[in-house]
Image (cartoon, rainbow, N blue to C red):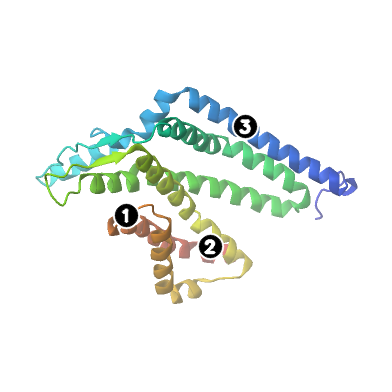
Amino acid sequence: MKPETADSSTMTFWDHLDDLRSVILKSLAATMAVALVAFMAKEEMFSILLAPTQNDFVTYRLLDRLSGLAGTGMEPMQITLINTQLASQFLIHIRAAFCIGILGASPYILYQLFRFLSPALYSSERRVAIRVIAGSYVMFILGAGTGYLLIFPLTFRFLGTYQVDTDIDNLITLSSYISTLLTLVLAMGLFFEMPVLVWIFGRMGWINREFMHHYRRHAVVIILVVAAIITPTTDIFTLLAVSLPVWILYEASILTISRGKR
C-alpha cells in the first residue's frame, strides 16, 4: 500500500518548509504557554521541585518504614539551601518554568511532528510510528519519575548529609540543587528510552540477542562512562545510583529483541 500523498505530492519544497515552520511555531507557542502557567504558579512548582529536601517526602517515608521493619530508623536530615548570587533565584525560576513547559507541551509537540511526517509514511509505517512515539513518551515519563522519586532523593540525602567532620555543616546552593535535579531527571528519562531503541534496532536487523549477550561487558563499561559524564557530581554513589537502573534496563531490553525480530 502506498502512502497517502495525494495532497503532499503536489506541494513544493517551500510548501513543506512552511508546514515545518508552522509546526515549530505551534510547538514554541505551546511550550511558552505551559511555561508561563508554571512561572505564575511559583509556589506550586517549587513545592514539587523542593519536596526532596523535606523529611516527609514520599521516598523518605517509605524508606523509614522499611528500615523500621528491620528494627532501625532513618535519622531526620537537616540540610539548608542557600542562594549566593543576586539574580540566581529569578534565573532559576525562569529555567525551571521553561523545563516544565517543554515537558508539559511534549505530547502536543509530538503530535505536531507526527502530523508533519505522517504523509510520507506507509500505513504500516504509521502504525509502527505511533507505537514507537507512544512507547518512547511513556518510557521517558517513567524514567523521569524514577529520577525524581528514587535516584535524586537518594543522591541528595546521601551527599547532603555526608560529613568528613561534624563541625563542618553542609550548605547547598539552590543553583547546585536545581541543576542536579534537572540533570538526573532528564538523564534517567533518556536512559529509559533504551528498550524502545533496542526494539527498533532489532526490527531493522541491526542487533540480536546474541549480539547483546556477547557485548554485555562492553555495555557495562559504556554505561559507567556515560553516567560519569552526564552526572553533575563526581562521587561514586551518584555514579552507581544512575548506572544500576540503566544496567537493569539493558538486561530488560534483551527481552524485546525476539519480539522485535518477529
Label 3 Cα crowd, 10 Å radius (few <14 / some 14-19 / many 20+): some
Where residue 56 appears, as percent x and y from the top left, is 24, 32
Residue underneath mark 2: 198
Figure quadrant of the N terminus:
bottom right
Q: Which secondary structure lies at badge 1?
A: helix
Q: Which of marks 3 and 2 precedes in the sequence? A: 3
Residue at the farthest front position:
86
Where residue 36 appears, as percent x and y from the top left, is 54, 26
Q: Residue at x 53, y 56 (%)?
A: 196
Q: Residue at x 39, y 62 (%)?
A: 247
Disc number lying in front (1 or 2): 1
Residue 168 placement, left or right of 233: left
Kindly indicate whether the residue at mark 3 contacts the one at mark 2 (C-beta within 8 angstroms): no
State the CA–CA distance, disc 1 to disc 3: 34 Å
Q: Amino acid at mark 1?
A: Thr
Q: Is residue 128 above or below residue 173?
A: below
Q: Nearer the viewer, residue 161 or 211?
A: 161
Q: Is residue 240 visible?
A: yes
